[in-house]
Amino acid sequence: MIKLIAFDGRLCTPLSVVADDLRDLFTSDPVLLVEHDGGDYDSVKWPHPNHEHLRSALYRSRETGVIPSGTLKVELPNGETFTIDA
């Protein structure tokens, strides 16, 4: 299970879990981003994330290879488990 990182009020994925072929694209832990219908992006806030935004950002991260494709749950910085596909 991946443990997400809180940095500067936002949730991030640890760089260590990013697929090898994508790792060179990042200079630090990737911020989880949610894409809105109009094409705008927002980061997922911490410590009070919008669960719909978090689920969407994690699903997108899984689909793009930022987190492993088999990831079904993550651990939040406070130790809670969060299910991606609810």
Image (spheres, rainbow, N blue to C red):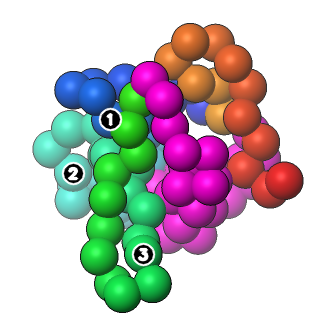
Please tell me which residue is depicted at 54% across the width and 66% down the height of the picture: 60
Place of residue 24 in the rendered image (x, y in percent of width and height, measured from the top left): 22, 55
Q: According to the image, label 1 marks what residue?
A: 10
Please tell me which residue is depicted at 20% across the width and 38% down the height of the picture: 28
Instruction: Return the disc, 2 or 3, that comes first in the chain's sequence.
Output: 2
Please tell me which residue is depicted at 22% across the width and 59% down the height of the picture: 25
Q: Is residue 77 magenta?
A: no
Instruction: Tell me the quarter of the picture where residue 35 sits.
Output: bottom left
The residue mark sitting in front, 2 or 1, is 1
Q: Is residue 19 visible?
A: no
Q: Are marks 2 and 1 in contact (CB under 8 Å)?
A: no
Place of residue 31 in the rendered image (x, y in percent of width and height, measured from the top left): 32, 46
Q: Is residue 60 magenta?
A: yes
Instruction: Give the answer, above or below, for where 15 lies relative to 75.
Output: below
Instruction: Tell me the quarter of the picture where residue 29 sits.
Output: top left
The residue mark sitting in front, 3 or 1, is 3
Q: According to the image, label 2 marks what residue?
A: 26
Instruction: Return the disc, 3 or 1, that comes first in the chain's sequence.
Output: 1
- Which numbered tag is attached to residue 36? 3
Place of residue 56 in the rendered image (x, y in percent of width and height, measured from the top left): 58, 62
State how far apart marks 3 and 1 are (Cα). Answer: 17 Å
Q: Nearer the viewer, residue 11 or 14?
A: 11
Q: Secondary structure at mark 2?
A: loop
Residue count near mark 1 (Cα–Cα under 10 Å), binned few <14, some 14–19, many ≥20 = some
Instruction: Tell me the quarter of the picture where residue 47 sits.
Output: top left
In the rendered structure, which segment of residues is drawn in magenta?
47-73
